[in-house]
Image: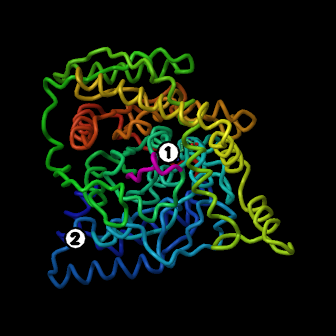
């Protein structure tokens, strides 16, 4: 059921919020030991919240838009009184004293928290294998990764363990796992959604966004979490359009750009390429115009990102010093050894690698050669997009070069892992909104995702085009079978 359908069921009295939450809890208890999408669970409070929704409903009180909708939240978003670990030993016992803006907005809208979801430590990774609390599996094939870093949220939505989830996307961490798990995932424009209470990874790139089963649900969730926030100075003070209301507009005459550089990638699987081309043909048959576009700097995205993101991460993660909060190593007798041994024991190896790269790129002798140069290339990437949006309304690419890979496949080769974000990173560097949705399956039945990238604050258009595509194609009706359930 979509959120809108569920709302109708609830208002007609066909099902209660408590019944719905109980169903999800039972399913989590039955299958999540296989998927490992959840870390902390919140069942007791969830049931109480659901009861409150049912009481309000029986008293005739008007229900808010997400009343009774069961949510999962990536464990790098602060939830007051509920552990928020970032899948790191460093924050294993951290219980935030405040709530993030996005989650507060969900609870104000009546949504219910089922639990917090697994991620790559501090959102660094593309497979959810870099978690201190075990890897998450892909529900389409449990020998494969769900993508990352928001793999727990993506796998939870895909396997019916929540109705919707939030993730964060710094270089692709919502869209790539959405693609691997066959669900909808959206990264809004930088500044569209508040980052207050999102544990910082790379502050000029991070954005929060939804994972959902369908595009209209993504519109509903984005509607609730978007908009100005005095707690985040980078959050834009502009009005939020009616995302849901615009979905049904037809796309006749829309100019869709196909970025040449994306389709010429060496690592792009033929099945992924064919599937996205087929999707573009369907859009053309619906009245859209297809235009080939050059973005010459598109492929510099990865190299640029892996200077800028670790640089910002090395500054952000300096706060974990064993003093203010987080893990503190015992049995050391001076401040400097305490800090270094807390970090060495508290952080996993990928996080350490990023801190080392970032500290190096920012150090006095190298800042011009690496960090400043990367910032210049970032501007060129943004200019490529600006030029493209003079000719087209929206861009279409595959979300990831391949479908879900096997667990452990890239363990020995971090660069191969980094390449899985080749097609998602440029939108983060340029601050643009982008959405991934399923468009087909590969030869072994794994979902393939397509990505639409829009100009700044064009979420309304992105959702409309994605919705129109979703209605015209039938791939979204496929769900993973529950064969993995013992
Ligand atoms: N996979 C990318 C990285 O490892 C992106 C992560 C993200 O978007 N949080 O940095």
Ligand 1's image quarter is: top right
Q: Nearer the viewer, residue 447 or 451?
A: 451
Q: Residue at x 13, y 38 (%)?
A: 249
Q: CA distance from mark 2 to mark 1?
A: 29 Å
Q: What SS does tag 1 mark?
A: loop
Q: Which residues are magenta?
A: 202-210
Any magenta on residue 449? no
Q: Is residue 168 left or right of residue 333?
A: left
Can you give x and y, in whole percent of width and height, for residue 261 in the image? 44, 17
Q: Is residue 234 left or right of residue 89?
A: left
Q: Is residue 217 visible?
A: yes
Q: Which mark is residue 173?
A: 1
Quadrant housing residue 17: bottom left
Q: Is mark 1 within 8 Å of ligand 1?
A: yes
Q: Nearer the viewer, residue 42 or 317?
A: 317
Q: How is the image coloured?
A: rainbow
Q: Is residue 4 left or right of residue 28?
A: left
Can you give x and y, in whole percent of width and height, for residue 325 in the image? 63, 73
Can you give x and y, in whole percent of width and height, for residue 317 in the image? 62, 57
Q: Mark 2 = which residue?
A: 64
């Amino acid at each position: 059921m979509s959120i809108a359908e569920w709302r109708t069921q609830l208002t007609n009295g066909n099902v209660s919020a408590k019944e719905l939450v109980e169903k999800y809890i039972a399913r989590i208890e039955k299958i999540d030991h296989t998927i490992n999408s959840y870390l902390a669970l919140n069942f007791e409070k969830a049931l109480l919240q659901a009861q409150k929704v049912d009481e309000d409903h029986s008293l005739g009180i008007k229900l808010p838009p997400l009343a009774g909708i069961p949510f999962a939240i990536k464990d790098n978003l602060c939830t007051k009184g509920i552990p928020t670990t970032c899948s790191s030993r460093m924050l294993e016992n951290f219980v935030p004293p405040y709530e993030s803006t996005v989650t507060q907005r969900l609870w104000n809208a009546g949504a219910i928290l089922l639990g917090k979801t697994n991620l790559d430590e501090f959102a660094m990774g593309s497979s959810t294998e870099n978690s201190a609390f075990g890897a998450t599996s892909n529900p389409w094939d449990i020998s494969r990764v769900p993508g990352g870093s928001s793999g727990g949220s993506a796998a939870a939505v895909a396997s019916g363990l929540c109705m919707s989830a939030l993730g964060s996307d710094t270089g692709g961490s919502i869209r790539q796992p959405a693609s691997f798990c066959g669900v909808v995932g959206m990264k809004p424009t930088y500044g569209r959604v508040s980052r207050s209470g999102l544990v910082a990874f790379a502050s000029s790139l991070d954005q929060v966004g939804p994972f959902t089963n369908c595009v209209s649900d993504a519109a509903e969730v984005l509607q609730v979490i978007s908009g100005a926030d005095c707690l985040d100075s980078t959050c834009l003070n502009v009005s939020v359009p009616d995302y849901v209301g615009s979905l049904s507009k037809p796309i006749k005459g829309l100019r869709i750009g196909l970025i040449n550089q994306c389709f010429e990638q060496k690592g792009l699987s033929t099945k992924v390429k064919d599937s996205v081309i087929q999707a573009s043909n369907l859009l053309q048959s619906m009245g859209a115009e297809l235009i080939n576009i050059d973005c010459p700097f598109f492929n510099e995205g990865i190299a640029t990102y892996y200077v800028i993101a670790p640089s910002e991460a090395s500054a952000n993660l300096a706060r974990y010093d064993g003093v203010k909060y987080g893990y503190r190593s015992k049995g050391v007798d001076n401040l400097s050894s305490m800090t270094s041994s807390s970090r060495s024991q508290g952080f996993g190896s990928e996080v350490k690698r990023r801190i080392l790269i970032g500290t190096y790129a920012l150090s006095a002798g190298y800042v011009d050669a690496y960090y400043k140069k990367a910032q210049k290339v970032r501007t060129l990437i943004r200019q490529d997009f600006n030029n493209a949006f003079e000719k087209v309304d929206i861009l279409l690419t595959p979300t990831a070069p391949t479908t879900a890979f096997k667990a452990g496949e890239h363990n020995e080769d971090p660069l191969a892992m980094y390449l899985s974000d080749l097609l998602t990173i440029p939108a983060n560097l340029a601050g643009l909104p982008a959405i991934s949705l399923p468009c087909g399956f590969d030869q072994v039945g794994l979902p393939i995702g397509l990505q639409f990238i829009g100009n700044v604050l064009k979420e309304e258009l992105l959702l409309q085009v994605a919705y129109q595509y979703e209605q015209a194609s039938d791939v979204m009706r496929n769900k993973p079978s529950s064969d993995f359930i013992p």
